[in-house]
Image: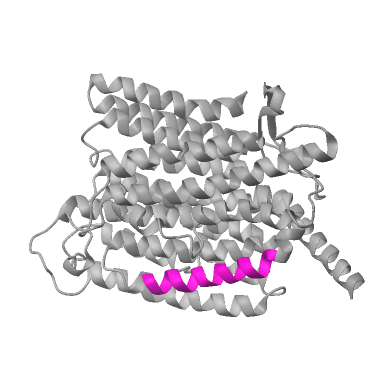
Amino acid sequence: MILVWLILIPFIGGLLCWQADRWGDRAPRWIALATMLFVLIISLVLWVTGDFALPGEVTRHWLLEWRTSWIPRFGIEIHLAMDGLSLILVALTGFLGALAVLCSWHEIDHRVGFFHLNLLFILGGVVGVFLALDLFLFFLFWEMMLVPMYFLIALWGHSGSAGQTRIRAATRFFIYTQASGLLMLVAILSLVFVHYSNTGELSFSYDTLLGTDVPDALAPWLMLGFFVAFAVKLPVVPFHGWLPDAHAQAPTAGSVDLAGILLKTAAYGILRFALPLFPEESQAFAPVAMTLGLVGIIYGAVLACGQQDIKRLIAYTSISHMGFVLIALYSGSELAIQGAIILMVAHAFSSAGLFILSGQLYERIHTRDMRIMGGLWGRIPVLPGFTLCFVAASLGMPATANFVGEFMVLFGTFPNAPVVVGIASVGLVLAAIYSLLLMQRVHYGPEYRQGALRGPDAREYGMMLALLVLTVIVGLYPQPILDITAPIAGPAAELFQQAGAELASRSGEVN
């Protein structure tokens, strides 16, 4: 039942925040913070006490599992399970959820209870995505995140230049993700009906559908239905159009959730569902997926170099970093897949840090335009130093978690796709360029405004310090994460290689 409570706690906390609004603005904030810290503590206790010495064969072994019948007529269950990958991402959700509450402590000053209702409902949906194994339940949680995120951007976001309004950004986010989600629903229903026609059993169970014999003409289309839904959320070029506006116009808490958590649900979906359900089709699609990853790496980095809005710059860097994750997932290498998981965690820390810093700057100077930010290094204590640290992490400096993730991705992918690695390495050079541009435009150069600005208070300092310490710890000692993800990455890579061998044998028979 602990899995059920991990999902229910954010929803119950959100409703309590909504009702506590009548007692003032402080009550919803404290309730929301306590809720996410509770989720984080439960996750850490499971991490410390869990047994992750799992078999290395292509089987599923869950640390925790809970299932009960829900709609038996259609074979729908409430089936929740947790392994090392789920545990890492649920713990990350609890941690970044607490930071999202803290960074909105002074930024959100109206409808505070309703704001935290939407924030915690998003986080509850994310936890559900990471734990759900019934495909209908997974889709339910996948869609559940959309409406509260729409409200978060539309009601508490910031409008930018002419035509760049928060309503427009929220609507674009909703349309992109809703349309792609419907494609995944069609793919899920098609897979269920194929299984029903084969066996006479109607089931949405992940374990049951894994062995479904899908006709060769249909399987690639079903795989694409899953891939497009995950590619929009990751995001993959050319399905990325919603991301820059959503990040730029969202409140700081929304940007932290989007970059730190929601993008990771897509990578999780590819690794958990798209690859195991359609291994041969994914193997055949791998060159296309890796090409899209390369395009995202270069495209995101080049466009980041040309941005003047600090939040749009950070948003485009996310596109570039997620390109490395996409390459790793389709590389068929255990080392690269583990690197992708490390990079997901590292990107969550570094991007959350940069977005929180941009929010703190906005609270002080009321602009996100880097053209009128110069000369802040000597006028604001501490924050420029933290910015330099997170910029260094974002460009993959050694001793940071990003370096470990990117190195493992490139090193693991090289034996199978050396050309891909060579081209992807250009993204590392571009990362140095946009990182230096950010530091130069914001903290150096001419001073456009006079006078000192206040430094961070204890709340802001604590958030930055926690993110920085975790970034360095994972960068220097990633072994705990590698230990609990090896049982996931190993079977996934083995399954991918078996699918490649099967395709090669079929091709040889045809020839």
Q: In this view, does 130 lie to the left or right of 380?
A: right
**x then y, percent, for residue 61:** 76, 40
Q: Which quarter shows the N terminus?
A: top right
**x then y, percent, for residue 63:** 70, 36
Q: In this view, does 507 lie to the left or right of 84?
A: right
- Residue at figure coordinates x 78%, y 36% from the top left: 196
Q: Residue furthest right?
A: 509
- Residue at figure coordinates x 60%, y 38% from the top left: 138
The answer to which quarter of the image holds residue 83 is top right
**x then y, percent, for residue 492:** 73, 54
Q: Nearer the viewer, residue 476 or 489?
A: 489
Q: Give the range drawn in magenta.
A: 285-303
Q: Which of 246 and 200 is in front in this view?
A: 200
Res 425 seen here? yes
Look at the image and say whether residue 290 sits in the magenta stretch.
yes
Q: Which quarter shows the C terminus?
A: bottom right
Res 61 seen here? no
The answer to which quarter of the image holds residue 244 is bottom left
Q: Is residue 277 left or right of residue 130?
A: right
- Residue at figure coordinates x 45%, y 72% from the top left: 299
Tell me: residue 311, above or below residue 174: below
**x then y, percent, for residue 431:** 43, 72
Tell me: residue 287, above or below residue 86: below
Name the magenta segment's main secondary structure: helix
Look at the image and say whether residue 293 sits in the magenta stretch.
yes
